[in-house]
Amino acid sequence: MDLFEAVGNTPLLSLSQLTAKTPGINVLAKAEFLNPGGSVKDRAAKSMLLDGLAKGRLKPGQTIIDATSGNTGISLAMMGAFLGCPVVLYLPANASRERKSLIKIHGAEIIETDPLESSDGAYLAVLKEVERNPDQYFFPDQYNNPANALAHYNTTALEIWEQTGGRITHFISAMGTSGTFMGTIRRLKELSPAIKGVAVEPSSPLHGIEGTKHMDSTIKPGLYDAALIDELVRISTAEAYSMAKRLARECGLLTGISSGANVAAALNYSAGLPQGSTAVTILADTGTRYLSESFWGV
Amino acid sequence: MSVTVKIPAALRAYTDGLSDLALEGQTVGQIIDALVERYPDLGPHLKDDDGQLQSFVNVFVGSKNVKNSGGILAAVPDGETLMLVPAIAGGSGDN
């Protein structure tokens, strides 16, 4: 097995410790933090790189460049090291020290962009650089590359379908590039049109839920398809922090802030569902890359 | 005393699209209060239910993050720049 083959096929965990108030309703979480790069973004990075290689757009030794708020950058840095390709990543300057360190440890270069402009600023900056030197780079363009969502269409959705024995009734997930949500729910709805897609987004345009977008105040990704969203749940940063702590202390799961948002949304939403419902959400990344955050209270 | 407050892109819908505002105040808290007074709709995005600055908002006076060194009581010299930086990337922002 090589690094690429180690991506995916993650466990689907029961969150029974948190569901005492919703008896008869299954709330399950896909443990994406167990991917080799520590996040769900390994799936998208692998898919976009293999797609680039297959189409001849990524040539051996060519520099990979993209904008990221962190996790995709870590995945691209890790896989670029594996492939022998240099990696250049544009990150908002307020990315955590842990994320920057992980990227640099894999040998990638970081270009920091204006933190006031957040991930949109990083994206616009990388677009300018690619326009200046179009032949120099392979630009996966994670916000608009169909191979991102296809990773979830072809793997995440099928794994969830098999792991629940086809019993999933609701897929609940936050959106950044929206690749995880769109790819997964598109396939699940093909398998069973009754499955509902519940999107999660920060309750404020100013938030601390890393890797997620408040769609109305940011550049909408090309992958975003509002028609696949049946319902929208908004979660505050405080709720996400609180649930990340509960996951660590009550379930033994050290995951990141967006995982906290996803589980908080899944629990809130599933409280109103009929008995026998099965809601599945995503534990998007490991909490070890947020150790410098004060909300843990340690 | 006037300072320049730099508004993150995410909140410019509440400041008529303006990215730089001149406001009066001697401390971070006074300047944020003046900002919310001028644009009341910003209040819930910057402050929590207890009226405290949201925990994920870092405040830079010049290039120094004062969140853990003075916080809202930190002095802001005349002519200085105050920057509100969301920890949107999960960052401590103390770089």
Image (spheres, coloured by chain):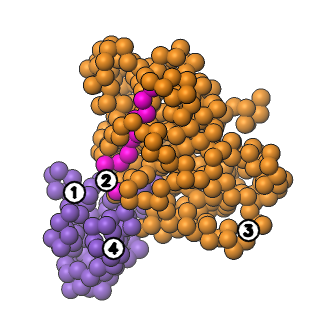
Chain colours: A orange, B purple
In front here: A203 or A222?
A222
In the image, which disc is placed on residue B17?
Answer: 4
In the image, which disc is placed on residue A47?
Answer: none
Number of disc labels: 4
What's the residue type where badge 2 is placed? Ser
**Dividing the image into 4 quarters, which one contains the C terminus of chain A?**
top left
Is residue B37 left or right of A135 when viewed as pictured?
Answer: left
- Circle 2 sits in a helix, a strand or a loop, which is it? loop
Work out whether residue A234 can be spotted: yes
In the image, which disc is placed on residue A204?
Answer: 2
- Judging from the image, mark 1 belongs to the subunit labelled B
Label 1 to label 2: alpha-carbon separation: 9 Å
Query: Circle 1 is placed at which residue position?
Result: B44
Which of the 4 quarters of the picture holds residue A229?
top left
- The residue segment tinted magenta is A195-205
Is A202 inside the magenta-drawn segment? Answer: yes
